[in-house]
């Protein structure tokens, strides 16, 4: 089966570049790799580019919008740009002659006219992102209008629509009136090259101390990821009498002081190097819990990675989290609107009854094996690709 794989990234580039080891790129990389695990699937990459001729008019629009309304102009949903994407992709599809078009996201297919059926896979709709993520907040009316129009057009063109969460799927139904029969849920997998074995995970869990709690927070967007809440949780556990240390990855390490602190600050770790991957794996293996009390999150691939290491995730209940975190199986979701007391009590109770914690850690790995790895995800993607072709 010939698959035209539309991605915003050039997947032919070497993975050794640090900038390639960011989640948006890795999702495209691992999903394409997963589809090709079956040798009967032949994937051709289509990577539309933004032409330089659009830079000046878009920059002018951005400045005008900022000056007149103090609002953000979103050039990525500009019809002129999306129409050009559509023409670029259509020409390549005509040359490839695929059986199906697999689109990672909806941007490149909003104005795509082609004969093969389209399957799209996204973690959010434009409506879901609007005033949820900072980049999609305080948009000017024109950008909002263009964004909704592009999303509607792309979804109407898609024969099969995949989302990573129930939350994203529901926004497609509510905001764009998509028939639920065309929508299916397929989660992402962990962005790791080598998954730990069951024996290795059991050893990791067994080596974690029962008389102290090690927490791990990973994220560069401090406010959106809920970094302040993660610190508050750490402080709450210490006040409850449980010695707790939080390792924060992705924030300036110079915040570490000379005096003892429950928080260790670690700069961004690039997994493009062997040393970076080994360091991240060690931090995962040593952690009792992953903390991600985000204010906004579409899915949370790092939860899949934590599950792969037998690390339960404590997250907020926003966005796509309830679809990746199975309560009391690979962690638990909480509403942090009223503070951290409930989450702190949950973790403290597990640490006090350490056998229960170890059971949760082991079931987290089971959840990874059952549905949060690219082997299982790839099987689902290939089946939906076949169904799309008919």
Image (spheres, rainbow, N blue to C red):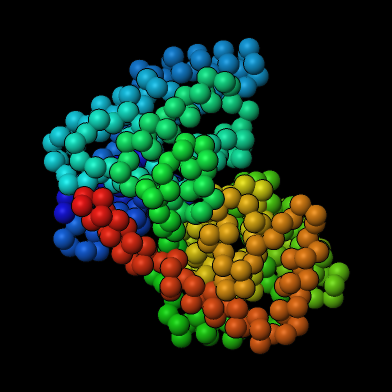
Residue 91 as seen in the image, left or right of residue 142: left
Q: Write the residue at 48% across / 48% down.
A: 169
Q: Write the residue at 48% across / 68% down.
A: 278
Depth order, front residue of 80/118: 118
Could you say where residue 238 lies in the image, as x and y percent from the top left?
82, 70
Depth order, front residue of 149/246: 149
Q: Residue 232 occupies which quadrant of the picture? A: bottom right
Q: Is residue 61 above or below residue 47?
A: above
Q: Residue 194 occupies which quadrant of the picture? A: bottom left
Q: Write the residue at 61% across / 32% down.
A: 137
Could you say where residue 348 lies in the image, as x and y percent from the top left?
76, 75
Depth order, front residue of 176/264: 176
**Any part of residue 18 in sight:** no
* Count of all numbered marks drawn on residues in the image: 0
Could you say where residue 64 lies in the image, as x and y percent from the top left?
57, 12
Q: Write the residue at 60% across / 83% down.
A: 359
Residue 221 as seen in the image, left or right of residue 109: right
Q: Quadrant of the N terminus?
A: bottom left
Residue 387 as seen in the image, left or right of residue 327: left
Q: Is residue 151 above or below residue 37?
A: above
Q: Is residue 262 above or below residue 384?
A: below
Depth order, front residue of 246/223: 223
Q: Is residue 329 above or below residue 203?
A: above
Residue 59 as seen in the image, left or right of residue 219: left
**Any part of residue 179 in sight:** yes
Could you say where residue 350 lies in the image, as x and y percent from the top left?
71, 79
């Amino acid at each position: 089966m010939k698959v035209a794989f539309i991605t915003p990234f050039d997947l032919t580039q070497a993975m050794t570049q640090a900038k390639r080891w960011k989640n948006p790129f890795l999702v495209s990389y691992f999903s394409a790799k997963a589809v090709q695990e079956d040798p009967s699937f032949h994937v051709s990459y289509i990577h539309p580019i933004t032409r330089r001729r659009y830079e000046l008019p878009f920059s002018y629009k951005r400045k005008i919008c900022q000056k007149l309304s103090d609002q953000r102009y979103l050039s990525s949903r500009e019809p002129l740009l999306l129409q050009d994407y559509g023409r670029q992709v259509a020409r390549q599809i005509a040359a490839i002659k695929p059986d199906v078009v697999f689109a990672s996201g909806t941007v490149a297919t909003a104005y795509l006219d082609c004969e093969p059926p389209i399957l799209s896979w996204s973690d959010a709709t434009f409506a879901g992102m609007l005033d949820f993520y900072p980049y999609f907040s305080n948009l000017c009316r024109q950008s909002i209008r263009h964004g909704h129009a592009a999303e509607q057009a792309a979804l109407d063109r898609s024969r099969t629509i995949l989302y990573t969460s129930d939350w994203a799927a529901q926004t497609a139904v509510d905001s764009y009136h998509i028939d639920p029969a065309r929508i299916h849920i397929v989660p992402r997998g962990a962005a790791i090259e080598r998954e730990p074995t069951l024996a290795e995970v059991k050893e990791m869990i067994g080596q974690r101390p029962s008389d102290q709690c090690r927490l791990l927070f990973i994220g560069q967007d401090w406010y959106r990821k809920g970094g302040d809440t993660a610190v508050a949780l750490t402080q709450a556990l210490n006040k409850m009498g449980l010695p707790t240390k939080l390792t924060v990855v992705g924030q300036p390490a110079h915040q570490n002081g000379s005096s003892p602190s429950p928080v260790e600050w670690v700069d961004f770790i690039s997994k493009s190097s062997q040393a970076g991957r080994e360091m991240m794996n060690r931090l995962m293996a040593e952690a009792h819990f992953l903390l991600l009390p985000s204010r906004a999150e579409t899915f949370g691939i790092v939860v899949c990675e934590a599950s792969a290491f037998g690390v339960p995730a404590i997250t907020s209940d926003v966005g796509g989290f309830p679809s990746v975190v199975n309560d009391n199986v690979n962690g638990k979701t909480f509403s942090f609107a009223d503070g951290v007391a409930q989450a702190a009590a949950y973790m403290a109770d597990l640490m006090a009854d350490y056998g229960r914690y170890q059971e949760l850690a082991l079931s987290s790995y089971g959840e990874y094996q059952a549905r949060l790895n690219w082997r299982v995800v790839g099987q689902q993607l290939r089946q939906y690709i076949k169904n799309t072709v008919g």
